[in-house]
Amino acid sequence: MTDVSHRERELARQVLASEGREKDDGLECFDASEALSAGDRVLRKMCDHLSRWFGAEGFDALLARALNRTKPKHPIVALVLRAPRDNGPTRGFIDQTVHIEDATALMDGLVAIIASLIALLSRLLGEEMAVHLVEQIWPDTRRGELRVNKERVAE
C-alpha cells in the first residue's frame, strides 16, 4: 500500500486518458484492450523520459517499488505488468496478450500504478520537480491541474 494524494490519482487518470481515444469519453469508456494499450504507452513515455534522469535501471526500480505498493489492493496489475527488461529495451511494459474481462478493475489498477509512480517521484524529488517532469512528458496538461497536494490518503 502507498500513500497517494487525490491529485496524484487525478493526474494519473489524466495522463492515462490522454493516451487513450481521441474523443474525450473518459476512462470509463475504455475496454480492456484500450486500457492495456494506453497503460503501455504511459509507462513507455515515463520510462523514456525519466530514464534520462535516473537511468533505465532507476526507472525499473521505481516501477518495481510502485508495483509492490500497488498490488495488494490491485492484484490485476501484477497480472499485466511485465518484469523490467524482460525482452530487451524495446519491449512493452504491459502484457497485452492477457485476457482481462473486468476493464474497470484493470483501469483502477493502471491508475493506481501510475499514481504510485508519481507519488514516489514526489517523495524523491519534491513536488515541484515531480510535477515538472510529468509536464515535460504531457505538456498539454495545464499546470494548475498538475499540482500535487501535500495531503496524502491511503490507497
Image: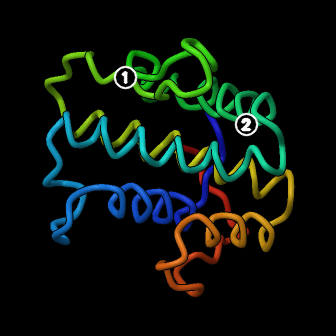
The quadrant where residue 125 appears? bottom right
Pointer 2 local density, CA inside 10 Å: few below 14, some 14–19, many at least 20:
many
Residue appearing at x 39%, y 15% in the figure: 79
Residue appearing at x 55%, y 50% in the figure: 45
Look at the picture and state if 110 lies above or below 92. Answer: below
User: Sequence order check: which comes first, mark 1 or mark 2?
Assistant: 2
Mark 1 residue type: Ile
Residue 107 horizontal/vertical position (percent): 31, 42
Query: Any mark on residue 76, and which?
Result: 1
Residues at marks 1 and 2, CA–CA distance in whole angstroms: 21 Å
The quadrant where residue 89 appears? top right
Horizontal side of 38 relative to 55 (left or right) equals left
Does dot 2 land on a helix, a strand or a loop?
helix
Horizontal side of 35 relative to 68 (left or right) equals left
Does dot 1 land on a helix, a strand or a loop?
helix
Query: Could you say which is closer to the camera, residue 71 or residue 61?
Result: 61
Quarter of the picture holding the N terminus: top right
Look at the picture and state if 49 lies above or below 133. Answer: above
Query: Any mark on residue 59, and which?
Result: 2
Residue appearing at x 39%, y 42% in the figure: 39
Horizontal side of 1 relative to 72 (left or right) equals right
* Colour scheme employed for the rendering of this structure: rainbow
Residue 68 horizontal/vertical position (percent): 63, 23
